[in-house]
Structure formats: structure tokens, C-alpha cells
Image (spheres, rainbow, N blue to C red):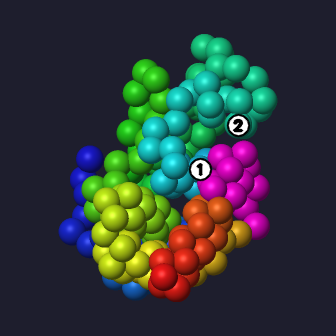
Amino acid sequence: MNIPDATLEIQTLGRFRISVNGETVATGWPDETLKLFFCSLLSPLDLYLTWDRICRSLWDVPETRTDRHRIDGEIIRPLNNYLIKEFGFTPLVTGTDGIRIDRKGIHVDAMEFYSTVLEGLRELSLNNQAAAIKKFKKADLLYTGTYLPGMPGKIITNTRNELGSLYRTVVMAASDIAIR
């Protein structure tokens, strides 16, 4: 994989935008299915999606060899071609069990938000309230809106709900700690 020197910035909180050095890229997706599939892979809750989960998400059926070939032909190959054209490389990593995005050279705001919340919760569990508040305040700044607003799909909707719940928990936890 030929990863560029510049970091690919992917904004998923509040809106969907992909940029390199401040310039928006990937604005003309070949079709909505490819865009939604790619966005599903951006979830910080699912670092690796199994083929079975993908089949159930796309078509409400368990994985079969036929469906796996269908995903490869209808989604993976065209998506790889599009990403190479837009980014100069493809971050997709496929294996026998599923697919993921190689996050080298890629920054996803939702991933940073999620890891910051987890770090804050860890600090809180260690009774380090000052560090927890600092992390929660950072997470509050990172959360600029709902995850991929308006985009359908089971994986995206689940991620949107989970991140929204985490955000509400972080804000409430930070407020509760600050009051004490």
C-alpha cells in the first residue's frame, strides 16, 4: 500500500468530509452504497467488520460464499478503485474473516473522540478526577455533532446512537465531577 505523506482527515461528527491538507477530496462517490459501506468501516466501535456482519447489515442475510463474492465484486473492487483514484492509495484491508480500514495516515475525528472518552473513563476509574475532567472537556470539544448525520445503515445508526450516548455520559460525568 502506498500511503501518502499527508494525513487523510475524515470528519464524521456533525458532517461527513474527507480532506488532505485542508482540501476536500472524495466528493463524487460512484454510488451511495459504496459511500455508506466506506462510512460503516469508519466506526470506532467496530475496528474490524466480519463478512457475516456485513451481509446482515446490507441484505439481512447470513454470509454465504455467493454473498461474499457479491460483496467483493459489487463493493470492494469498485470501492478500492475509487479510493485509489481519490486518495492515491486504498486503506481497505480485507482478510478471510472480514474487512477493516488501515488507519495509518488517516485521522478520524470519531476515533479520537471515542479514545478520549475511554481515556477519561480510565482516569476516573483510577480516581484521577483532574485528568478525567481534562479528557472529558477535550471530548466535549471534539464532539461537533452527531455521527454521520442523515446517513442510513445499521452499523452507522448503531455507532451514532452509541457515540451520542457516550457524549451525554461524558458531559454529565464531567459536570458531576466539577460540582463536587
Residue range corresponding to the magenta coloring? 150-162
**Disc 1 or 2, which lies upstream in sequence?**
1
Task: Identify the image quadrant of residue 57.
Answer: top right
Relative to 152, residue 18 above or below? below
* Secondary structure under the numbered disc 2 in the rendered image: helix
For the point 69% across and 58% down, the residue is 161
Q: Disc 1 vs disc 2: Cβ atoms closer than 8 Å?
A: yes
* Left or right side of 175 for 31: right
Q: Residues within 10 Å of mark 2 (few under 14, many from 20)?
A: some
Q: Is 83 above or below relative to 17?
A: above
Please state which amino acid type lies under the numbered disc 1: Ser
Q: Please tell me which residue is depicted at 65% across the width and 46% down the height of the picture.
A: 155
Residue 138 position in % (x across, y down): 41, 80
- Residue 40 is marked as 1
Tell me how many marks there are: 2
Amino acid type, mark 2? Ser
